[in-house]
Amino acid sequence: MKVVVVGAGIVGTCVASYLLRDGHDVVVVDSEGPGEGCSKGNAGALSPGSCIPLSAPGVLGKIPKWLFDPLGPLRIRPAYLPAALPWLIRFALAGRNDKIAGLANALRAMHADTFENYAPLLANAGCQDLVRRTGTLIVYKTASGLADSQRERDLRDEHQVRQRVLEAAEIRDLVPDLSSEYKHGVLLPDHGSAANPYRLVQSLAEQFVRDGGCLERRRVTGIVLREGCIAGVQTTDGEVLSDRVVIAAGAWSAALIASLGIRVPLESQRGYHASISEPGVTPALPVVSAEAKVYATPMEDGLRFAGTVEFAGLEAPPDFRRADALVELARDMFPALAVGEVSQWMGHRPCLPDSLPVIGAPPGHPNLLLAFGHGHHGMTAASTTGRIIADLVSGRAPPVDLAPYRPDRF
Ligand SMILES: Cc1cc2nc3c(=O)[nH]c(=O)nc-3n(C[C@H](O)[C@H](O)[C@H](O)COP(=O)(O)OP(=O)(O)OC[C@H]3O[C@@H](n4cnc5c(N)ncnc54)[C@H](O)[C@@H]3O)c2cc1C
């Protein structure tokens, strides 16, 4: 079967790799090249135990305080507020208590086998070194911060996610360079990270081409319909016809299917990073400052501080003061940090209000498969998404119940 995959981020690349393993004729089309979107500069955390929806009630209560701090973890640019408001209302409704258990189940199902589903792709590409299974440490300065996380820890327990609350001395043993202000921690021993998310996407994409896949650098401008059926994509360089089309274009996906009358409330949550190439401190595992909402991930090319959420749409230029603020938080986390050369980056997290992606065919379009909206967990969820889409195309039963990710659930 011929399949066109739109988007060569981590999701499209995993989808294409799994489809090729099944013997399909696969063409990936990306306007920028593999890994140039959100998959490039993220925090790289691979979090099989992640099962906490972003809109959980505890989070909603903190939002007003964050909004008064222009460089805090959450920012809505005032001019963008009217555009973001409908999405924000859906987000708030998704955080209702009676919804949380279902969302947590669906998140855990999407993330649990991240390492297992990456394994064959990494082995094939010979880049197993890019995935590290070190565990992740979440740290808190205050006892109240740790206490606030009780609901999250309960959810992890309900989903059999291994975790251990650490005392200050244990934190110090694990990450000696961390500020002694962090007195409480939760260790997630089964989590890990990508040593370089960009190189991971590129390595998988290069292997995809070596294995006979086709990678085209063009912009997709529309969907081709023949007698009411989807028959390929229109690009800046002509049509690419196919039996199936997979939309995995991250935060840009919703616009591509709007002409078909398919409406998915996809919003960009812009995030930033500041990467320090010679940090002088070397945490052995990713450390998350829970109160500041910042990830410090050791990467093969330095120490990356990533986080923050900004609502400003797909077009507004980055506000790199947010990346500067990450450096200040970095200094606070690691007092001995050597801030030499710093690279800054902004990316568009593709987010749906209920924290779940859309995966599967929308009603009336069996040849079209959607695979986008993985939000804050796209690196983690990509490998399982790839497997699921290949199962759907090849007519096998996918490994997880797809009902929670239905494209028409909104
Ligand atoms: C600061 C930050 C930290 C993060 N940390 C983590 C983390 O620790 N762990 C984790 O699991 N996730 C994390 N994420 C989320 C993760 O990065 C995303 O969920 C993931 O990268 C989305 O992948 P994607 O393939 O769907 O989209 P993208 O990587 O954005 O890829 C989409 C691709 O589609 C292409 N495209 C778009 N429109 C068109 C078109 N019209 N024609 C052709 N091509 C097109 C783009 O060029 C792009 O290459 C983080 C995100 C941010 C911003």
Image (spheres, grey):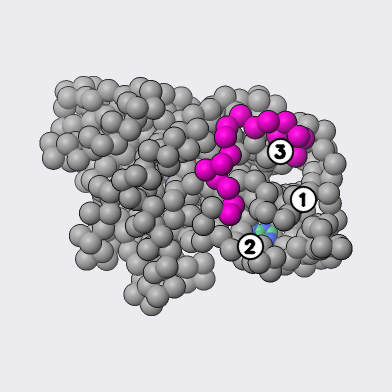
Identified by mark 2, the residue type is: Ile
Dot 1 crowding, Cα within 10 Å, few <14, some 14–19, many 20+:
some
Q: Which residue is mark 1?
A: 367
Does the Cβ of the disc 3 residue fall within 8 Å of ligand 1? no
Rendered location of residue 331, percent (x, y): 25, 47
Q: Tell me the residue at 82%/33% (across/down).
A: 23
In this figure, which residue is indicated by the disc labeled 3?
392
Q: Which mark is residue 262?
A: 2
Q: Position of residue 2 (x, y in %)?
A: 84, 45
Residue at left offset 68%, top offset 40%: 389
Task: State the image quarter where residue 291 is shown.
Answer: top left
Query: Which residue ends up furthest to the left in the rendered image?
Result: 143
Which of disc 1 and disc 3 is earlier in sequence?
1
Residue at position x 26%, y 42% in the image: 290
- What x and y, as percent, mark residue 208? 74, 38
Cβ–Cβ under 8 Å for marks 2 and 3 = no
The residue closer to the viewer here, 120 or 287, is 120
Q: Residues within 10 Å of mark 2 (few under 14, many from 20)?
A: some
Q: Where, by quadrant of the figure, is residue 102 drawn?
A: top left
Q: CA distance from mark 2 to mark 1?
A: 14 Å
Q: Is residue 334 visible?
A: no
Secondary element under disc 3, as helix, strand or loop, is helix
The residue at the point 28 percent across, 31 percent down is 154
What whole-number distance in Å separates the C-alpha atoms at marks 2 and 3?
A: 20 Å
- Residue stretch in magenta: 390-408
Mark 2 CB within 8 Å of ligand 1: no
Q: Residues within 10 Å of mark 3 (few under 14, many from 20)?
A: some
Q: CA distance from mark 3 to mark 1?
A: 11 Å
